[in-house]
Image: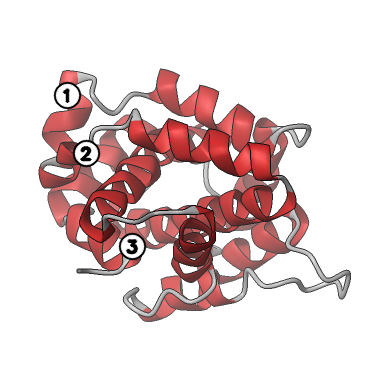
Amino acid sequence: MNDIFTQIKDSLTDQAIGTLAEKTGLPADKGGDIANGVMGLLFDKLANNANKDEKEAEAIQKTIEKHDDSVLDDVPQAIQDGKISAEDGAKILKHIFKNQNTEQVADQLAKETGEDKGGILNMMKYLAPLALSALNKTKKETGNFDIPQMVDTLTKGGASANNLSSIAKNVVTSLLDQDGDGDLDIQDAVTAIAGNTKKK
């Protein structure tokens, strides 16, 4: 069984990154690193949410089951067919970040990287459903995806992703808390991602 980030990496082919670049307006040559960094952020936030509240963890499990893992086989086609949609992604992001404003995260990240806020936000919207589809595939492959195992998978997908490009790997491993408060927060994550994708 492939780990969660191997599944994501295999799915985010050059064609998929190109499609995301077209949809978001972000440069294709940075799209992969931004996508992998944002995906790591999503997994870390999901892990934190599941760790803090058992009911939240159960809700995440139910949501995962609703996302078709077959979209991983052809991401560009899934986007074209609407199986991966920004509308669905917006709802997922609202749930993941809860009281934290997703647009503010995108705005800050855009300022730090020099990329377009709308493009960053749309990238997040397209990747959120893909993250849940990848988790559903992992759930099916393991056959036993209880809450501890789910949290472990999410945590490894966030901070311990070993199958990324060197820049993206630095982004994800830097998602560990930087302000010493013992928890991952949005500022920490944005600073980490921005520091590895900023325009020269």
Marks 3/2: CA distance?
21 Å
Q: In this rendered view, identify the residue nearer to me: 50 or 5.
A: 50
Tell me the quarter of the picture where residue 192 sits.
bottom right
Does the image show residue 200? no
> Which residue does the image show at 27% across and 35% down from the upper left?
22
Residue type at mark 1? Answer: Gln
Which x, y percent locates residue 85? 33, 24
Left or right, 192 with reference to 19: right
Say if mark 3 contacts mark 1, CB within 8 Å: no
Residue type at mark 2? Answer: Thr
Marks 2/1: CA distance?
9 Å
| Mark closest to the chain's N terminus, 3 or 1 | 3
Q: For residue 80, which numbered disc appears in the image? A: 1
Mark 3 sits on what residue? 4
Tell me the quarter of the picture where residue 48 sits.
bottom right
Q: For residue 19, which numbered disc appears in the image? A: 2
In the rendered image, which quarter contains the N terminus?
bottom left
Marks 3/1: CA distance?
24 Å
| Mark closest to the chain's N terminus, 2 or 1 | 2
Residue type at mark 3? Answer: Ile
> How would you rate the neighbour count of disc 2 (Cα within 10 Å): few for under 14, some for 14-19, many for 20 or more?
many
> Which residue does the image show at 72% across and 45% down from the upper left?
53
Which element is circle 2 on? helix
Q: Is residue 166 above or below residue 38?
A: below
Tell me the quarter of the picture where residue 125 sits.
top left
